[in-house]
Image: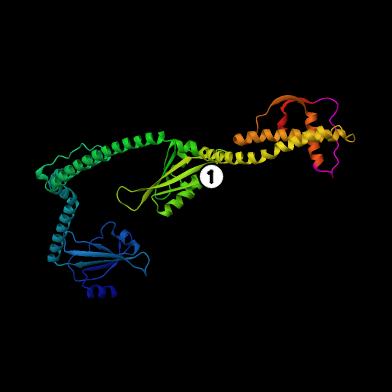
Amino acid sequence: DLMNKEAVGRSLAHAALIKPDGSFVMSAKTDTDFAMPEPPEGAVASAADGKPVLIEPKTRNIMGAIVKLREIEGLYLYTIRLVDPEVIKARQIVRSNTDEYRGLEDNRRTSQVAFALPYLSLTLIIILSAIWTGIAVADRLVRPIRQLIGAADEVATGNLDVAVPVRPSDGDVASLGDTFNKMLLELKSQRNEILSAKDLIDERRRFSEAVLAGVTAGVIGVDPYGIVTIVNRSAEAMLAISASAALGQNLSAVLPHVGRVFEIGRKSGKPVYREQVTFYRAGAERTFNVQITIEAGDDGSEEKSYVVTVDDITDLVQAQRSSAWADVARRIAHEIKNPLTPIQLSAERIKRRYGKVITEDREVFDQCTDTIIRQVEDIGRMVDEFSAFARMPKPEMKAIDLRESLREASFLVEVSRADITFERIFGSEPLESDVGAADL
């Protein structure tokens, strides 16, 4: 009864309980005039997982459903409902349209490819044409610039004989190329002028070097900052310096004494400043005349260069000193020689007069008088030489016994120092040698 009420209340054409194999257990009684169809094969198995299975209408205007009952194990509810024929017709139309759409959907990619290929080919042709046109236009624009770049590279390597082709149709680029060509002509002209000036400067430099090499005085060129720029050969030899080591160095560091005079001359502001300096060079004391000459710049700038001239006047100074000392020596010799003759005559007279009278210490008496006479003679000879040129007399070489020379020398000291007792041990063998006896 419940099943009948539910079937009538829900407007079902049929309702039945079926088993998994499709056999009917019970059916509801309805007012329909057709028998309940068998469930489709496989429909019951599809509903075994608990999901309802719809049975679509085919040739008849009915629609069914199968659902598994959860409360009763092994039973399924099978229902049939009548459907309006118009709905069935509309459903068939929808299905047909759906199938057609699916067919079109399956063939869409092929159709798209078929339609896209012509468009793609046309687009590719247009793009290639645009690229070719762009390359042609770019080449027309870039070619003059590329020629400019190539010409600039040639100029960078020193080639100024290049020129950029100029076409009036290039517009502003043509003006740029024409300006570049004018610049190259100007650069070439300036380079030729610079090369000519360089040749002239080299010629002057060689002439100056030749002049400086022949000058006996030492010449040193100094810039406004005191840096050595030129050193001639005479300066190298005279001052014992190396030009390669001195160039680029400060003058005060290379030659401190000359650098001191240079600083004084520079600060004095005089066009020419001179001073004599004496210092050791090459192991000997030398006297130099240092002259600082200021050379104004050719461009009228305040920066000035300097020429340091060094003359070795050691020999001249020595000659002047020798001349002065020679005059002094002659005067001194004259004053010394005046009393020598009376002294010698007095000693000889004492020896002659008292030599026979003195009997005690006769040997000492003779030795003293002989020593006085001999020393006076030596002093007289030395004074003669000294007056000639203030030098030691030329030694007279002869063979003597050195023991006698030692005895005479010690006797001179003994008579002047009575507080000292002298003991002489000379041996018995003579000590002969060729010497200047007067110089001993």
Asked whether residue 339 appears in the rendered view, the answer is yes
Q: Where 133 sits versus 302, above or below?
A: above
Q: Residue at x 29, y 57 (%)?
A: 42
Is residue 428 a member of the stretch shown in magenta?
yes
Residue that numbered label 1 is attached to: 278
Query: Secondary structure under badge 1?
Result: strand
Q: Where 256 sits versus 198, above or below?
A: below
Q: Residue furthest left?
A: 169
* Segment colored magenta: 416-430
The front one of 424 and 228 is: 424
On the image, the x and y values in percent for residue 264 come to: 46, 52
- Residue type at mark 1 is Thr
Q: Residue furthest right?
A: 360
Q: Residue at x 37, y 68 (%)?
A: 72
Locate residue 259 relative to residue 131 in the image: left or right.
Answer: right
The front one of 369 and 406 is: 369
Q: In the picture, residue 36 is in which quadrant? A: bottom left
On the image, the x and y values in percent for residue 194 come to: 26, 40
Screen quadrant of the C terminus: top right
Q: Residue at x 68, y 27 (%)?
A: 396
The front one of 401 and 380 is: 380
On the image, the x and y values in percent for residue 244 come to: 45, 38
Screen quadrant of the N terminus: bottom left
Q: Main secondary structure of the magenta part?
A: loop
Locate residue 21 relative to residue 91 in the image: left or right.
Answer: right
